[in-house]
Amino acid sequence: MSATGDSTTARGVAAQGAGNGTPAQGVDPREAAAIREVLVLTPGVQSVGEVVIHRHGSGALVTAVLGFGPSTPVADVVAVLREVKAGIRAAAPTISAIVLEPDVAGPRDDMDTPTDVIVIRGAD
């Protein structure tokens, strides 16, 4: 799900310092694991893509891409995002900002056309 295709951040939690791509100092591995657990275990989240912690001053910014099914109502997506933010704040109180990007899966191109949409016209 990562736009960059970076498998390291798609599987785990990457930590970056002041936006320069260098590893952040002071990112607690337990805190990172707790954030990842909240993301993975929140009902309604179908997949977790890129997750990054940006350390700044005394706080930190968490960014994450969360996957939802194509038929998930927008109200449900909003409720799940709110729940995820509350879970992250409870699990990692040093987090000062959270940015979540919902990624709604579109229809798959590799599937056969369902038979209920095939129309056969006859002529007499």
Image: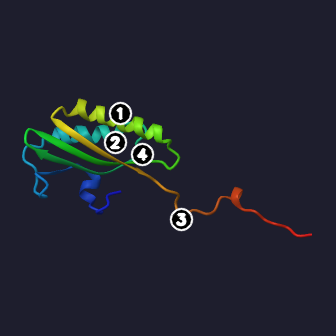
Q: Residue at horizontal 11%, vertical 51%?
A: 17
Mark 2 / mark 4, whichever is N-terminal? 2
Q: Residue at horizontal 29%, vertical 31%?
A: 86
Task: Give the residue type that dot 1 points to.
Answer: Glu
Whether residue 68 sits left or right of residue 1 in the image: it is: right
Residue found at the very far bottom of the displayed protein: 123
Indicate the colouring scheme.
Answer: rainbow
Residue wearing tag 4: 46
Where is the C terminus found, in terms of image quarters?
bottom right
Q: Gap in Å between the C-alphas at discs 3 and 1?
A: 33 Å
Mark 3 / mark 1, whichever is N-terminal? 1
Q: Quadrant location of residue 89? A: top left
Q: Are marks 1 and 4 in contact (CB under 8 Å)?
A: no
Q: Gap in Å between the C-alphas at discs 3 and 4?
A: 20 Å
Task: Give the residue type that dot 3 points to.
Answer: Asp
Residue wearing tag 2: 40
Whether residue 76 sits left or right of residue 33 in the image: it is: right
Q: Is residue 122 above or below residue 97?
A: below
Residue wearing tag 3: 110
Q: Gap in Å between the C-alphas at discs 2 and 3?
A: 27 Å
Q: Locate residue 38, reporting x and y percent.
A: 30, 37
Badge 4: residue crowd in 10 Å (few <14, some 14–19, many ≥20): some
Residue depth check, mark 2 versus mark 1: number of the one nearer the observer: 1
Q: Residue at horizontal 57%, vertical 62%?
A: 111
Mark 2 / mark 1, whichever is N-terminal? 2
Badge 1: residue crowd in 10 Å (few <14, some 14–19, many ≥20): some
Residue found at the very far top of the displayed protein: 90
The one of 78 and 23 positioned closer to us in this rendering: 78
